[in-house]
Amino acid sequence: MAHQWRGVIREYAERLPVTEATTVITLGEGGTPLVHAQKLSELTGSQVYLKVEGMNPTGSFKDRGMTMAMTAAVEAGAKAVVCASTGNTSASAAAYATAAGLKCAVLVPEGKISMGKLSQAIAHGATLLQVDGNFDNCLDIARKLGESYPVFLVNSVNPARIQGQKTGAFEVVDSLGDAPDIHVLPVGNAGNISAYWKGYKEYSAPYESATAGTLPAVSTKTPAMWGFQAAGAAPFVAGHPITEPDTIATAIRIGNPASWDTAIAARDESGGLIEAVTDEEILDAHRWLSSKEGVFVEPGSAAGVAGLIKKHAAGEVPTGKTIVITVTGHGLKDPQWALRTADGSEVQPVKVPNDVVTVATELGLDAR
Ligand code: AN7
């Protein structure tokens, strides 16, 4: 009988801070496809795979962490949760709070989140406030609310979020049979690079489970972690926070990442790197994914692919290796970017009369 995926908490319970008694809040997240990227593999001479996180219930990787955060909120007896967000965290928090029967407040930077994400938070009944400031300002307020008011913070500064998100690494290893040589991903608030590294480390050594004794190592190695930021919002490249981060990739428009130290540790312990890609490189990679691989992502999610293409052009991507790129969110979150050509002009669909001969002519077809 086909196995129904049970969500990341039940699939990986023995490696997460839960017990049999835990009330699990889940929407069936995780179990996302690891797609072989044919054209990127041809380009680089390595086997490149895409971990397609847009296939999660709310369309982004945030659901892996949110199932844990909302489970922890219920366990703590919370009545309301709060988060700051560039969009995907708010969409996820709103959906999981609904599943948990909790109130949800979200703080987003005014005018800087995509319509798809905004509509998700509203649809799931969150109280959404647009703050006159950027994401970093929103996160400051959310942290202070969590400290001094009766609301439970579900941003990735909450360790439960990182616990849930580490399952992305477990799934990659379970699919490939071992860890890849390089793992590439976009970096914003830096929770995900920290979480993947935690997951890879835990899978590469015996693990002391709180509920299942000592578990053997699953992988023989750990990958080099390659993170890419948008050039206008690249504090790790600058070596200090950026006060006015700017990029069209609103998901990663973050100047003062909360998981600073753990991201630096992921980079350095893994023998990896964190570099920057321009908005133009991000949009080129966005177009590459949709038109050459058949995978539609939001612009921020293409930063990792942009980084790999850039490193390849510089002769810095090894051949014959296994490379996984996490593409973090679905293209339908922010579809306007697909309706724009490489030169920046708007794509206008061709209009035709209701007539088969004209349609055939327009398609360049000759009658059989
Ligand atoms: C599509 O939703 O920070 O480095 O508030 O939405 O773990 O922050 C989103 C971040 C990458 C960066 N790709 O991940 C939020 C938020 C997408 C994202 C990132 C985000 P982190």
Image (tube, rainbow, N blue to C red):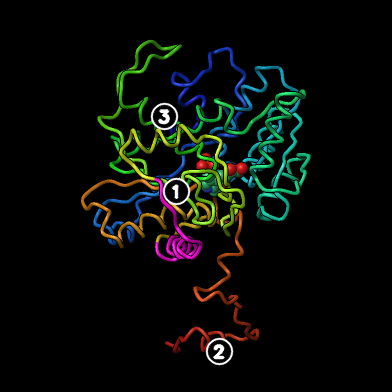
The amino acid sitting under disc 1 is Val
**Nearer to us in this view, 312 or 338:** 312
Q: Residues within 10 Å of mark 3 (few under 14, many from 20)?
A: many
Q: Which residue is mark 3?
A: 198
Q: Distance from label 1 to label 2 (Cα)? A: 57 Å
Q: Distance from label 1 to label 3 (Cα)? A: 22 Å
Q: Are marks 1 and 2 in contact (CB under 8 Å)?
A: no
Please identify, in this view, whether the residue under mark 1 or under mark 2 is nearer the observer. Answer: 1
Q: Is mark 3 within 8 Å of ligand 1?
A: no
Q: Which residue is mark 1?
A: 237
Q: Which residue is mark 2?
A: 357
On screen, residue 325 above or below 18: below
Q: In the image, is 83 to the left or to the right of 168?
A: right
The amino acid sitting under disc 2 is Val
The furthest residue to the left: 320
Q: Residues within 10 Å of mark 1 (few under 14, many from 20)?
A: some
The quarter of the displayed image where residue 285 is located? bottom left
Residue 229 x, y percent position in the rendering: 48, 50
Task: Give the extent of the magenta segment.
Answer: 274-292
Where disc 2 sits, the SS reads: helix
